[in-house]
Image: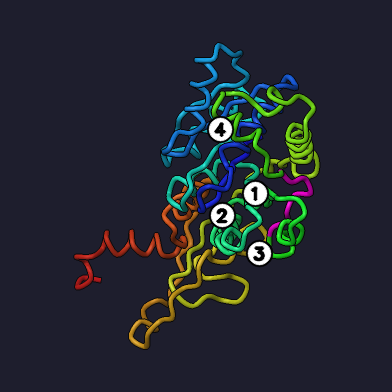
């Protein structure tokens, strides 16, 4: 399983959770690789500190802060039971690539109004990704919760709709800061302590109801709307077996009167399942609908042929 931890807001404890989840699974005999996809390289720093301390290596840490992650992570997963991706702190092409690579996306969020407000963008991005990857699972993880506070108690109710929050949450504990500085895990610093128990509960919940299920990619044609669409198909949709089509990631711009007579055709292309998947991935990585991307390609290709058309 490939698990990506992502949040466009920095300072939410994303790297700490990624390291501790990887460590928890590794402690139970699982083969784990952690991909440090954050340009800051904090997970790599932790791994180097652990090496300097002469401690046993629990799992491998690989630096892959590039937007080809969706192609490289599955290759690493061939030799591991789990791959954990410590994602970048902003919504970029790299973040989109991490989402495409993942079976499960976890969104760490602190119990503060700023974190709650900022989480809407990543929720929207995951909704967009699900048009291309319907089997993608995602959930919030409440991190650094301060016991006895109102917002710590009510944070789940304040989160944006559309994604669940895991039942297991992580408290604000000094041992996590110490673990970063020493290249250790909380379970090594305080075996059986509250922090270790919280991480164990989180890891167990992820491996339970939120364990990703891999689905078979269907074959089919690639149908692109270049304007108004017939009933049953969204603009820029991808034709699915049975005649349905996924809705576009973004609504098409309102056509002006001048363009209304131009964008009225539909283009249906028979493609292999592999090519169909690559078109969808390319559109998502570039933040475009399939229709927008193919229109751009067609307009660029036939820019000088308009007079002869």
* Labels 2 and 4 touching (C-beta < 8 A): no
Residue 238 appears anywhere in the view: no
| Distance between mark 2 and mark 1 Cα atoms | 8 Å
Alpha-carbon neighbours of circle 2 within 10 Å: few (<14), some, or many (≥20)?
many
Marks 3 and 1, the one that precedes in the sequence? 1
Q: In the structure shown, which secondary structural element does the residue marked by tag 2 occupy?
A: helix
- Report which residue position mark 1 lands on: 136
- Report which residue position mark 3 lands on: 160
* Labels 2 and 1 touching (C-beta < 8 A): yes
Alpha-carbon neighbours of circle 4 within 10 Å: few (<14), some, or many (≥20)?
some
Marks 3 and 2, the one that precedes in the sequence? 2
Say which of marks 3 and 1 sits in front. 3
The colour style of the image is: rainbow
Q: Residue at x 77, y 54 (%)?
A: 148
Name the residue nearer the viewer: 308 or 208.
208
Q: Main secondary structure of the magenta part?
A: loop
Q: Position of residue 42 (x, y in %)?
A: 48, 33
Disc number at residue 19? none
- Report which residue position mark 2 lands on: 129
Q: Quadrant of the C terminus?
A: bottom left
Q: In the structure shown, which secondary structural element does the residue marked by tag 4 occupy?
A: helix
Q: Position of residue 175 (x, y in %)?
A: 66, 33
| Distance between mark 3 and mark 2 Cα atoms | 17 Å
Marks 3 and 4, the one that precedes in the sequence? 4
Q: Which range of residues does the magenta coloring cover?
A: 163-170
Q: Residue 4's image quarter? A: top right
Q: Residue 3's image quarter? A: top right
Marks 2 and 1, the one that precedes in the sequence? 2
Query: Is-magenta flag for residue 217?
Result: no
Marks 2 and 4, the one that precedes in the sequence? 4
Alpha-carbon neighbours of circle 3 within 10 Å: few (<14), some, or many (≥20)?
some
């Amino acid at each position: 399983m490939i698990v990506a931890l992502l949040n466009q807001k920095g300072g939410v404890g994303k790297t700490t959770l990624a390291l501790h989840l990887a460590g928890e699974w590794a402690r139970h005999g699982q083969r784990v690789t952690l991909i440090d996809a954050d340009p800051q390289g904090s997970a790599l720093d932790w791994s180097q500190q652990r090496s300097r301390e002469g401690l046993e290596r629990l799992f491998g840490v690989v630096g892959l802060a590039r937007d080809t992650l969706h192609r490289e992570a599955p290759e690493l997963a061939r030799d591991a039971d789990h791959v954990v991706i410590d994602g970048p702190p902003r919504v970029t092409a790299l973040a989109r690539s991490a989402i495409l690579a993942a079976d499960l996306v976890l969104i760490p969020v602190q119990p503060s109004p700023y974190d709650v407000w900022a989480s809407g963008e990543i929720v929207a991005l995951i909704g967009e990704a699900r048009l291309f990857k319907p089997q993608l699972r995602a959930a919030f993880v409440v991190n650094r919760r301060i016991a006895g506070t109102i917002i710590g108690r009510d944070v789940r109710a304040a989160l944006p709709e559309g994604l669940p929050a895991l039942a297991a949450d992580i408290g604000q504990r000094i041992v996590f800061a110490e673990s970063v500085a020493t290249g250790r895990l909380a379970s090594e610093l305080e075996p059986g302590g509250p922090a270790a128990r919280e991480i164990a509960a989180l890891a167990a919940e992820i491996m339970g109801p939120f364990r990703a299920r891999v689905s078979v990619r269907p074959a089919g044609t690639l149908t692109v709307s270049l304007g108004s669409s017939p009933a049953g198909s969204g603009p820029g949709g991808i034709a699915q077996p049975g005649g349905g089509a996924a809705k576009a990631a973004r609504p098409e711009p309102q056509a002006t009167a001048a363009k209304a007579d131009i964008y009225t055709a539909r283009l249906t292309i028979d493609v292999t399942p592999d090519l169909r998947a690559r078109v969808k991935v390319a559109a998502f990585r570039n933040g475009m609908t399939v229709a927008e991307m193919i229109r751009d390609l067609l307009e660029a290709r036939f820019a000088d042929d308009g007079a002869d058309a």
